[in-house]
């Protein structure tokens, strides 16, 4: 297979994500009509920032494929087909074709969605080329702020700051890294980042919504994928919020309103959701191991494939809730009526 496509891939953070383009199969000796695949390697990356440095990992992103003939030609070669969905092990990463995009794009995300990707995937098939001259292939991987998670920081703030301030700073830095993933930041952008950091560190409040307002974060969209470990969000209104992949492990969420929220793949293990409003929320694949749901309103919530093992479900309301393949073993406060409902809904009781 002598005629491999030329790969163009600008990669500012090679320790965080690296791509390798692979011809998987062809019908002849040249690349020609054949299947194109990609192998992805993920890790954690240190990068200097302000007067310190941060380390971050990736939970997903957008993979964009652009094929061109020789530089003198403008048209792109046709694809006979594109791969729509695929996943592999041991690296738990799913790729899903983005519909109606101008160029072939795949949404990549970890399974579960709150997990940082670490390791190398099997080759993922992307599509089948039509027969033509071997193309030049441009492959881009672009994460959004919800796909970037800080795992360490040095010389940027004291380590004894509150979990709420830490969570908002983490989102500010993730937003900055995503925005400047391809093009280096201007001095003005770095100055704005430093201003936001100082605003949070010097704030006289610890309320999560007030902190978010200081740095122009929208709680309904910008908390998705964030690390809110052990935060205090008691009574906060996040109804309808996009919170997929958020890490709320051990958080205090008493009386929080997350009705109609997108909590797919969220980590809520050990969280206190006593009295929470979760009606019509989507908790598909969420981890609620040992969470307290006492007195929570769960009407119409979707718990498909969620982990509810050892959760406290005392006095909860489950009317119209979906529990297909949910793990509901060793529940605290389980009544016979709940048990029958779980069985009818296809939950797994061990």
Image (cartoon, helix red, strand yellow):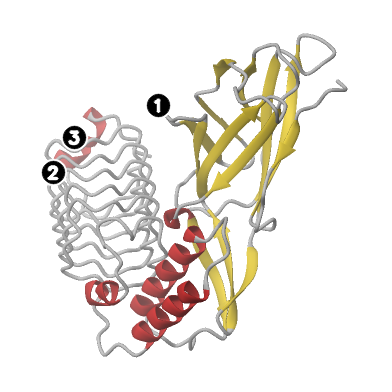
Residue lying at 71% horizontally and 14% vertically, measured from the top left: 132
Task: State whether residue 50 is above or below residue 333.
Answer: below
Where's the N terminus, which quadrant? top right
Residue at numbered disc 3: 341
Where's the C terminus, which quadrant? top left
Q: Which of marks 1 and 3 is nearer the N terminus?
A: 1
Q: Earlier in the sequence, mark 2 or mark 3?
A: 2
Task: State whether residue 336 is above or below residue 83.
Answer: below
Q: Is mark 3 on a helix, strand or loop?
A: helix
In the rendered structure, the answer to whether residue 81 lies left or right of residue 281 reads right
Q: Which of marks 1 and 2 is nearer the N terminus?
A: 1
Residue lying at 59% horizontally and 32% vertically, measured from the top left: 66
Residue at numbered disc 2: 299
User: Label 3 near label 2: C-beta < 8 Å?
Assistant: no
Residue at numbered disc 1: 100
Q: Nearer the viewer, mark 1 or mark 2?
A: 1
Q: Is mark 1 on a helix, strand or loop?
A: loop
């Amino acid at each position: 297979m002598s005629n491999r496509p030329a790969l163009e891939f600008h990669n500012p953070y090679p320790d965080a994500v690296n791509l390798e383009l692979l011809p998987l199969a062809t019908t002849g000796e040249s690349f020609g009509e054949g299947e194109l695949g990609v192998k992805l390697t993920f890790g954690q990356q240190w990068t200097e920032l302000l007067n310190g440095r941060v380390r971050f990992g990736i939970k997903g992103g957008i993979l964009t494929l652009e094929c061109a003939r020789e530089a003198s030609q403008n048209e792109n070669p046709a694809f006979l087909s594109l791969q729509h969905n695929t996943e592999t092990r041991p690296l738990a990463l799913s790729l899903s074709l983005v519909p109606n995009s101008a160029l072939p794009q795949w949404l990549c995300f970890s399974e579960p969605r709150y997990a940082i990707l670490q390791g190398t995937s099997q080759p993922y098939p992307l599509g089948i080329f039509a027969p033509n001259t071997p193309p030049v292939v441009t492959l881009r991987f672009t994460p959004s702020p919800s796909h970037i998670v800080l795992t360490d920081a040095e010389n940027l703030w004291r380590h004894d700051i509150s979990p709420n301030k830490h969570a908002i700073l983490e989102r500010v830095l993730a937003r900055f890294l995503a925005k400047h993933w391809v093009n280096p930041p201007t001095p003005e952008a770095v100055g704005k980042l430093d201003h936001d950091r100082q605003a949070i560190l010097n704030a006289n409040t610890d309320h999560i919504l007030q902190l978010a307002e200081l740095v122009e974060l929208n709680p309904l969209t910008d908390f998705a994928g964030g690390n809110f470990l052990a935060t205090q969000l008691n009574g906060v209104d996040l109804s309808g919020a996009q919170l997929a992949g958020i890490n709320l492990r051990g958080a205090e969420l008493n009386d929080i309103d997350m009705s109609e929220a997108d909590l797919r793949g969220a980590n809520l293990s050990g969280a206190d959701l006593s009295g929470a409003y979760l009606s019509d929320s989507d908790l598909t694949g969420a981890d609620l191991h040992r969470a307290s749901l006492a007195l929570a309103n769960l009407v119409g919530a979707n718990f498909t494939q969620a982990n509810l093992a050892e959760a406290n479900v005392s006095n909860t309301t489950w009317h119209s809730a979906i529990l297909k393949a949910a793990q509901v073993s060793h529940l605290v406060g389980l009544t016979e009526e709940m048990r029958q409902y779980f069985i009818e809904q296809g939950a797994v009781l061990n």
